[in-house]
Structures are given as structure tokens and as C-alpha cells.
Amino acid sequence: MKKLKLTSPAAKELGFLPIRYSAYGEDVSPEFVLKGLDKKGKTLAFVLDDMDHPTKPGFNHWLAWNIPAMDVVPERLPKGRKKDQPFHIEQGIGYGFFRYRGPKTPKGETHIYRYTVFVLDASIKLGLFPTKKALVKAMEGHILQQAELNVKFTLKY
């Protein structure tokens, strides 16, 4: 399997994510760059989790799938369960309902947030109110590659 690397102009690995991409800012998804994307990949899926959530480590903030496989995923992905502009995207239920929902760390705390991208060999079909658990199950047997980008976020007053 070819090694995949996930980066973003918004933040380096374990760097601080700007407020713009958080629930305290514009709450828009950052741009993502995939290096080493397998040419057999048909779709991408993204998951964003708060790894330092005090009661639910790995608390899910965002899930999106059926994005056409591409090397650069632009920032500001649209809100909604299913959209076809600027390209096809489907989103489920995490902290954000059918949309990107960025970090929302309590005042004075720094959390690590993990963006995970999955390169899939097929489109995924899910029900009306899909959760991370349903997405993970549906992706079984279809994952060609995956990569992570861990960023920090803290709200500075």
C-alpha cells in the first residue's frame, strides 16, 4: 500500500489551528492536501475528533464522505447532509449536524484534534442520520489508505 500524507496550510502536525477554523471563529473546514494518493481511490471520507474531550476522548466533531478522490480538498466545505457543489459531499451527525464543526475547547484548555482522511475504493451508502460508528462500519473492506493530521486548539482571551 502506498503511504499517504495529510497536511493543511492551516496548521502543521501538532501546530495550533487558527481560530477561523473553530466554533469560536468562522467554523469553516480547512484546506487539506493529500500526498501519495492511490490512483485507485474513488472517494474520500473525513473524520474530526477531539482527542482530549474530558468525558468522551475521541468525541466526534465532523464526518464527511463520498468526496471525489482529489489531491487538494478546498476549505469551506458546504453545510448540508448531501451537496453537489462544488462537488459531491455527504455529511453526518457528530458535534456538527450535517456540517463541519470545528474545535470548541473550554477556556484555558488546549486539546488535540485529529483529522483523519480515508481513501476508499467505492462510494458509501448510509442512512438518514449517520454517525461515526455507521461510517466506520460501512468503510470496512473499502479503505485503500488513511492518514491523520493532529492539531492543537486553545481559546486565547
Image (cartoon, grey):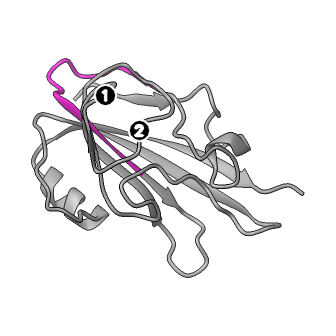
Q: Quadrant of residue 117?
A: top left
Q: Which residue is mark 1?
A: 85
Question: In the image, is residue 45 part of the stretch drawn in magenta?
Answer: yes
Measure the alpha-carbon separation of dots 2 and 1. Answer: 8 Å
> Number of callouts in the render?
2
User: Residue 154: percent from the left, percent from the top?
Assistant: 75, 56
Q: Residue 124, relative to residue 3: is it above or below?
A: below
Badge 1 marks a residue whose secondary structure is loop
Element at label 2:
loop
106 left or right of 137 in image? right
Identify the amino acid type marked 2: Pro
Dots 2 and 1: beta carbons under 8 Å?
yes
Query: Which residue is painted at 23% across and 62% down in the image?
Result: 130
Q: Residue at x 60, y 67 (%)?
A: 52
Of the numbered discs 2 and 1, the one sitting upstream in the chain is 2
Give how far across and how far down residue 10 sits, in percent: 63, 31
Residue visible at 14% across and 22% down in the picture: 40
Answer yes or no: is residue 100 visible: yes
Q: Residue at x 18, y 62 (%)?
A: 128
Q: Quadrant of residue 1?
A: top left
Q: Which mark is residue 78?
A: 2
Q: Seen in the image, is 95 located left or right of residue 24?
A: left
Which residue type carries mark 1? Gln
Q: Quadrant of the C terminus?
A: bottom right
The span shown in magenta is 33-47
Mark 2 Cα shell of 10 Å, populated few (<14), some (14-19), many (≥20)? many
Residue 92: say if magenta. Answer: no
156 or 11, nearer to the observer: 156
Which residue reaches farthest right?
A: 157
- Image spot of residue 21 (x, y percent): 62, 43
Quick check: 65 left or right of 105? left
